[in-house]
Image (tube, grey):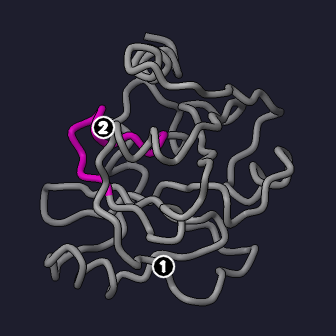
C-alpha cells in the first residue's frame, strides 16, 4: 500500500476532517515546521522508545527532547531507551523511514503524548512521507488514538541542531 493511503483511509472511515499539506522533502521536524510556517511547538514529532522487545511511541512538540526519566516514571518502565531507526523501521512498512505519523494504534504500538500538545486545537505531523504532512483537530486525534498523556519533554526546548 502506498505511503499515506492507510492513514487517509482510517481518517476517512472515522469521519475526520483533515488537510494534507504537500511540501518539498524535509527530514527534521523543525524543517517541516519552518516550511509549513507552523510554530515548532505546534508540530508533533514522533520518537520511538524501546523496552526490551516492545516499543512505545512518544509524541511531543518539535523543538523538545524526550525526558527519558519522566517517560520511565510515567510508563513504569525503567528499562526504556531510544530505539534506533534500524530497530523500528520494519514496524512502519507503509511509511518512509522516520516519517511515521503519531498513530501507533495502527501499528499496535502504545502512544504517549506530551501534555502540552493536548492543549492545542490542531495537530500537524508527518504523514508517512518526507513531503506530506497532515493537519487535523487534536480532539479527533485523541478520540482515534486514545493516547496516554503526561509531561514527557525536557523543560527547555532542544537546540535546533539536536535531531531527536
Kind of element beneath mark 2: helix
Residue range highlighted in magenta: 101-111
- Quadrant placement of the N terminus: top left
The disc, 2 or 1, on the residue closer to the chain's N-terminal end is 2
Up the image or down, 52 lies above or below 131; here it is: below
Up the image or down, 63 lies above or below 26; here it is: below
Q: Which residue is mark 1?
A: 153
Q: Nearer the viewer, residue 140 or 97?
A: 140
Q: Which residue is mark 2?
A: 91
Instruction: State how far apart marks 2 and 1 are (Cα).
Output: 24 Å
158 sits to left or right of 115: right
Q: Residue at x 39, y 47 (%)?
A: 142
- Magenta span contains residue 106: yes
- Magenta span contains residue 163: no
- Quadrant placement of the C terminus: bottom right
Q: Residue at x 53, y 63 (%)?
A: 117
Q: Nearer the viewer, residue 38 or 63?
A: 38
Q: Residue at x 84, y 54 (%)?
A: 34
Kind of element beneath mark 1: loop
Q: Residue at x 13, y 64 (%)?
A: 52
The picture places residue 28, in percent across and down from the top left corner, at 68, 54
Q: Nearer the viewer, mark 2 or mark 1?
A: 1
Amino acid at each position: 500500500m502506498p505511503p499515506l493511503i492507510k492513514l487517509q483511509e482510517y481518517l476517512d472511515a472515522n469521519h475526520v476532517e483533515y488537510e494534507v499539506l504537500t511540501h518539498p522533502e524535509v527530514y527534521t521536524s523543525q524543517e517541516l515546521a519552518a516550511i509549513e510556517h507552523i510554530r515548532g511547538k505546534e508540530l508533533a514529532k514522533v520518537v520511538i522508545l524501546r523496552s526490551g522487545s516492545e516499543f512505545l511511541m512518544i509524541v511531543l512538540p518539535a523543538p523538545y527532547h524526550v525526558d527519558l526519566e519522566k517517560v520511565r516514571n510515567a510508563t513504569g518502565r525503567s528499562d526504556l531507551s531510544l530505539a534506533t531507526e534500524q530497530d523500528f523501521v520494519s514496524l512502519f512498512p507503509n511509511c518512509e523511514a522516520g516519517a511515521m505519523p503519531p498513530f501507533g494504534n495502527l501499528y499496535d504500538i502504545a502512544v504517549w503524548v506530551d501534555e502540552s500538545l493536548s492543549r492545542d486545537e490542531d495537530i500537524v505531523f508527518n504523514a508517512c512521507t518526507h513531503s506530506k504532512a497532515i493537519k487535523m483537530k487534536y480532539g479527533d486525534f485523541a478520540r482515534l488514538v486514545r493516547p496516554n498523556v503526561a509531561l514527557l519533554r525536557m523543560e527547555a526546548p532542544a537546540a535546533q541542531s539536536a535531531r531527536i
